[in-house]
Amino acid sequence: MAAVQGGMVDEKEEVDIKTEPQSDGFVNTNATDGRQLSPSPGSSSSAGSSKTAAGAPEDQQTLLAVLQFLRKNKLTESVEILRREAGLPEDALDSKGVDCGAPGSGGSAGGVDGLDAGSLLSRVTVSSSAGTPAPTKAVADDQPDVSVVLSAYSQQGDPALYKVYYSDLKKFIESVLDCHRAELSQVFYPLFVHMYLELVYNNHESEAKAFFQKFSGDQECYYEDDLRVLSSLTKKEHMRGNETLLDFRTSKFVLRISRDSYQLLKRHLQERQNNQIWNIIQEHLYIDIFDGMPRSKSQIDAMSGSLAGEAKREANKAKVYYGLLKEPEIELPLDDEDEEAENEEGKPKKKKPKKDSMGSKSKKQDPNAPSQNRIPLPELKDSDKLDKIMYMKEATKRIRLGPENLPSICFYTFLNAYQGLTAVDFTDDSSLIAGGFADSTVRVWSVTPKKLRKVKSAADLNLIDKESDDVLERIMDEKTASESKVLYGHSGPVYGISFSPDRNYLLSSSEDGTVRLWSLLTFTCLVGYKGHNYPVWDTQFSPYGYYFVSGGHDRVARLWATDHYQPLRIFAGHLADVTCTRFHPNSNYVATGSSDRTIRLWDVLTGNCVRIFTGHKGPIHTLAFSPNGKFLASGATDGRVLLWDIGHGLMVSELKGHTDTIYALRFSRDGEILASGSMDNTVRLWNAAKAFDDLETDDFTAATGHIHLQDNSPELLLGTYMSKSTPVIHLHFTRRNLLLAAGSYAA
Amino acid sequence: MAEERRQKQCSVTLPTESMKAMAESVGVGQLQEESCVALSEEVSYRIKEIAQDALKFMHHGKRRKLTTSDIDNALKLKNVEPLYGFQSQEFIPFRFASGGGRELHFYEEKEVDLSDIINTPLPRVPLDVSLKAHWLSIEGVQPSIPENPPPATKEQQKTESTEPLKVVKPGQEEEGAIQGKGQGATAPDGKGKEKGLIRLKPRSTHELSVEQQLYYKEITEACVGSCEAKRAEALQSIATDPGLYQMLPRFSTFISEGVRVNVVQNNLALLIYLMRMVKALMDNPTLYLEKYLHELIPAVVTCIVSKQLCLRPDVDNHWALRDFAARLMAQCCKTFSTTTNNIQSRITKTLTKSWLDEKTQWTARYGCIAGLAELGPDVIKTLILPRLAVEGSRIKAVMEGSVISNIDKIGAEHVQSLLLKHCASVIAKIRPQPDTVEQYRTDYGYLGPMLCSHVIKARTQAALQAQQVNRTTLTITQPRPTLSVSQSGLSGSGGPRTPSIIKVPSSLTLMSPRPGTPSQPSPPATKYIVMGTSAGTASTQQVITLSSSQSASPVTSTVPSGTSTLQPLVKVESGGGPGLTASRPMQKYIVVSLPPSASSSLEPKSTVLSTSVSSTPLDTGIKLERSESPGVSTQSPH
C-alpha cells in the first residue's frame, strides 16, 4: 500500500504545477503572497475585486495593476507568467503603469472624484503600495501573526464619530431604492463588526459598548451567536487569542453585490468623504461584484449566515467529478438458486434480460465520473466480491420507495445509556450497530442472530487445519460469543464512529484527540491515530475502505490511510470546528461541515477546496450524499435541511420543519426519499426526488448562482414520526430500503 | 425584547465583591478596588469564553443540558486543569436566599460522615446499556404501541377542544407553525382562505383495536369489581398509561352511565369506584378531559349533591363520597375553567342556588357547602361566611328541636362540622385577633362559639407549625402528592415498574391527594397515618405502607405480627385534605394526622405526640385523634 501512497503524492504535485498558471490559482497565490509580504491587505483585495468587476478595457488596467504590484514585490517569475498569459507586450507595463498611476495618486490625494472602477482600483493599488506605513511594517516583522492581523485596526479615527458614520450609512441605505436596499444591507453586519473591533482595539471601551448597544439590534438574527461572542469582548487584551475575532480578521467577509448597488454605495461614501467606512470596506471586505439584476432579500437570506459571508463565485467554479465509479464486473452466480426455483415454476428466462440491462448500465462510463484510478483504491478481495454479490441480491429485493410508498422505520432505542450516547453507526448490511458513549467506551451489538465472536488465540490458531474450507469459521472462538462487546481505550467521550465497508474494522474518534482503529475480529484496538490534538468530532471510512477522514476542533479535516500513522492530506480552510465529515460515494471527494456554518467539498487528490456552500444559520451537524453522488444534504442546529447540487454548486432546496438540531440525514438507497432525524425526537421523511426535479437549471441561474427557493417544505414533507422522548441521532437505510433509526431514551 | 436581552449580554459581569471574596479565600487580604474591577471584567470574559466552548461539547454530546463535564472539557481545551470532583449528570440544586436587598444562590454542602458512607450498603448496580428495537412506523403509519408516543399529545387535545378550528393532524402541527413563520406577513392569507373553505370538522372514526377493546373491558371490570388489588392496578393504569386518548370517550360514557344507574340504586360503593376512575383520568398527564366534561361534570355533581347516595343514609358514610367528589369538582374547575366555558362560576351558581333553597335536604346541603368550600378560601369568604349565621340557626333548629328525625340530625351535625372545618382556617386568616366568644356569637350566631374555639386552635397550630419548621428545618410540604408512582422508563421496555401503592387488604380506602392547588394558601400536604384494627379477619400481617411523593417508590415492609387476631395497618399517606375513609364495619381507625405548616386541619381532641412513627422522619407534631370525632371524615360505625 505504500506504493499507492507514493503515487498519490506525485500526482498531487503534478496537478499543483498545472493549476498554477490558471488565473484562479494565480490570483489566489498572489493574495496570499501579498498578505505575507505586506501587512496591508488592501492590495490583494483590489486585485480580487477588480478582476471580477473588470470589463474589457478595464481588464488590461487591472492586469497592469497586478503586474505593477508583482514587480514591486519582486515576483519576477509570476510577472513573466502573467505577461505571457495575458499577451501583454514587455513595455506595456512601463508605459501604461504611469498612466494609471497618475489618476490613482490624484484619487488618493483628493479621494473625492467620482472615478470608475478601474481608476479607483489603481488608486488603491498605488496608495497601498506606496503608502504602506513604515511603523506597521516594523511591527509586523518581529511579531507573530496575530498582532500583524490586529495592527490593521490601529488606524485612529475619532471614536465618537463611529456612530455618526454608521447611522449615516444606515440612513442612506434605508433611503435607496428597494431593489438595492436588500443588497446594500448586507454591508451592515461586517461593517458593524469591524467598526466595533476597531473601537475595542483602540481602547475606546465605553464607545465600543455604546456602539454595540445601539446597533447590535439591527443585525440579522442569525448572527446572534457571533454577536454574543463579540459582546463579551470589550478589551484589547481579549482580542489576542479570540478565535472568532481572528476569523473576522484573517478572512475577508465576502459579499455579493450587483454592480449598480455597488456604484451607489461607492458614490455615497465618496460624496460624504466617509473614509472610515470606505477603508473598512476595502480592507476587510471582499465585494464580489456581478452584473445583472440585484438580488432580492429572500435570495440573499438564503445564502447568507456563515461566519465569513457568502462563498466567492470562483470558489465554486472548479469542476467536480460527481459521477459514480464504474462498478467492478463481478460474475454473478446470483441467479443460480433463484433460477432453479424459477425453473421449477416454469418461468425460466424472466430474470435474464433484466440482469443484462443492469450490467450494461454499469459498464457505461458516467461522463461526470472521475477516472477509475484518479485516486488509488484498494483492490477487491474475495470477501469483498462475495459481499458485492450479497448486495446485488439484496438490491433486487429492494422496495421502491416514493411518496405513496413510504419506508417502514425500525427504531433502535438505547436504554439505560443515561444520556451518554454520543455517536451511532450501522454497517452497510445492517448486521452490526456500534455506539460511542460519553464514558469513553465503544460498544458493538449484533442485531442478527449471529453473535459476535473473537478470533482464537495464537496458540489455538496453530491447531487449526488451514486447508479446510471453513477455515474462516474455525478460527473463531465459540466461547466468546455474545450479543455485544465493549471496546475500551479512549479517554474521553466518543463523538464519531464508523464501520469499515468490509465490517472488519471500526473507527472511533474522541474528545481525547485520537482516532482509533479497532479490529472486529479480535475486538482490540489496532492503531491510535494522533494528529488532531483537540477533540475529534467526526470520522468516516471511505466507501471503498482503506482511507478515512476525520475532523475536529482544530478546524482542519484530515485524510488518513489505515496503514499510515500520519495524515495523507490536511484540508484546512474552515474558520471554526469541523463538525462532520462525509466521503463522496466515489471516494474522490470529502465534504465537511463546520461551526462556521459553511460546508466545504474537498478534492481528495489535490487537497483543494472545490466547493463552499453557505446558507445555514447554525453549526452544521450532519451531511449526506445522495446515492448518485450529484447532491448533498446538510442539517444544522437551525433545524433546516438544505439540499445542494454539487455539479453546479447551487442550493437546491430548503426543508423546514424540524424544531431542533438535526443530527442525522440519510438518503434511501435509490435516492427517492431523504430521512432526517433530530433532537426534537422526530424522524421526518422528505420527497427528495421531487425536490431535485424542481431544480431550475437554466444557464442564468447556473452562471450567477442566484437561486429562487420555493417555500415548498410542506409539500415535500412526506411524514413525521415522533419518538417517545428519544432524540434521533442516526439513520440508516438497509439494502432493502428499510429505515433504521437510533437514539438513546432520555428519561 | 431581543434588544433588551442583548443589552444584558453586553453588561453582565461578576460583582467586584466576588473578586474580593475569592481573593480573601486564597489569602490575598487587601485588593484595590481598581484591581477588583479589572479582575472581574477579565474573569467574566473568560467565563463566557469557557461557557461558549462548553456549549460545543453539549451539542456534540447530543444533549440539551449543559453538564459539568462539558465545562471540564472546555477547560481542557484551554489547557486549564479541570475541576475534579464535580461530576453531576443532573442539575445541581442551588439554593436561593435573599435578604437585605441582596440575592444569593448557593450550593448547599452538607458535611457527610465518612463512616456513614462506608457503612451504607452499596446501591444496586445500574442496569447496563441495552438495545431495544420497535417499529416507529410501518409503511408510513405509526403503530400505536407503548413504545411510541400517544397519537395526540395533551397540548393537541387541548387546542383541539378549546380551539376546534385550529385542528391539525397529529405530527403536522409544527409544520403549520413554521409555515406561518417562514412566510411572515407576506403570503399566509391565500393559504388561510383556501383552508377556510375546506375547514369542515372532519368526522373522526373511533375504532378501537382488538387489544384496546380487551383493555377497556378488563379495566372497567376491574374498576367496579370486587377485588381491591385489581382495582388499584386498574386505576394506576388509567392514571399513567399514555395511550388512552382513543378510549377516553368510552370511559367518559361508562362513568356517566354508571353514575346515573347507581344513584338510582343507591349503590354507594360503585359510585365511589366511579369517582376514583374520574380521579385517575384526571391524574393522567397525557389526557385532556375538556371535551368530555359535559358527561363527567354532571356525574361528579350528582355525587356531591344527590339527596340520597346510599341505602342506609343514617349509617353509611356517603359524606366521604361527597367530600371526595367535591374535591374532584374543584380540581376540574381549576384545570378546565376558562373565560369561555365559565365552569367555575356556573358550578358556583348552581351550588349556591340549591344551598339557598329552603327545601334542600341536609344531605344535599352538605354537598353544596362541601362543593363550594373546596373551591378555595375566596369562595368561602364571599359565599359561605356571610351565610354562617343563617345556617347556624338552621342547625340550631335541628339540634335543639326534638321532633326531627335522626337522619336530619346526623345531617345537621355533618354540615356543622364541615362548616367549622372549612371556615375556621379562613377566618383565622382574615380576622384580626383576639378571638372572643361574644364577638363570634354576634357575628356568626349559633356557630360562633364553636367557630371561635376552632379558630383559636387553628392559630396555635399554625404558630406551632411555624416554630417547628424553624427548629428542624424539615420541609414537609411536598410538591405534588400523588397516588401514582411516577412511571419510569418506556412502559414495557424492561424498566422496573413500580408497584402500586395502594395495598389495602379488606378495607376500602378512598384517598384523595389533593392536586397541586396554587390558589389554595394552606399547604396541601398533610400526612395521615391511618391505623385500623380489624377484629374480624384472621390475617397475621402487619402492613406498613409509607408513601411519599418525593421518593420514587414506596417503601413497603411486611412484618409478621405476633398476635393473630389483630391486623394493625399503618398507612402514611402524603396527601392533602383529610384522608377519606369509608370502611366496613368491624374496623377501627385511628387517624394520626401530621398537620402541615398552616392551619388547614383543625380537629378537636388532638394531642401532640413526639414519637416518630415507623421509619419516617416525622419530627413535626403528630396529632392523634379518635375516630369518633365529628370533624374527621373517618368513621367507624359498628
Image (cartoon, coloured by chain):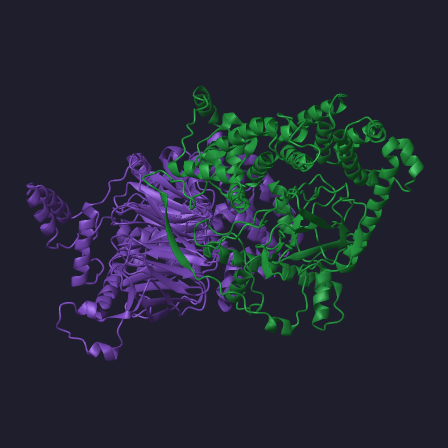
Chain colours: A purple, B green
Q: How many marks?
A: 0
Q: Nearer the viewer, residue A184 or B260?
A: B260
Residue A319 visible from this viewpoint: yes
A392 left or right of B63 in image: left
Location of the N terminus of chain A (image quadrant): bottom left
Q: Nearer the viewer, residue B395 or B108?
A: B395
Extreme residue in the right direction: B438
> In the image, is residue B613 above or below residue B430?
below
Q: Give the x, y percent position of residue A370.
A: 21, 52
Extreme residue in the top direction: B197
Q: Residue at x 71, y 39 (%)?
A: B519
Q: Give the x, y percent position of residue A351.
A: 10, 43
Q: Nearer the viewer, residue A353 or B155?
A: B155
Q: Give the x, y percent position of residue A682.
A: 42, 44
Q: Quadrant of residue B290?
A: top right
Q: Give the x, y percent position of residue A217.
A: 59, 42
> In the image, is residue B407 above or below residue A88?
above
B353 left or right of A28 in image: right
Residue A96 visible from this viewpoint: no
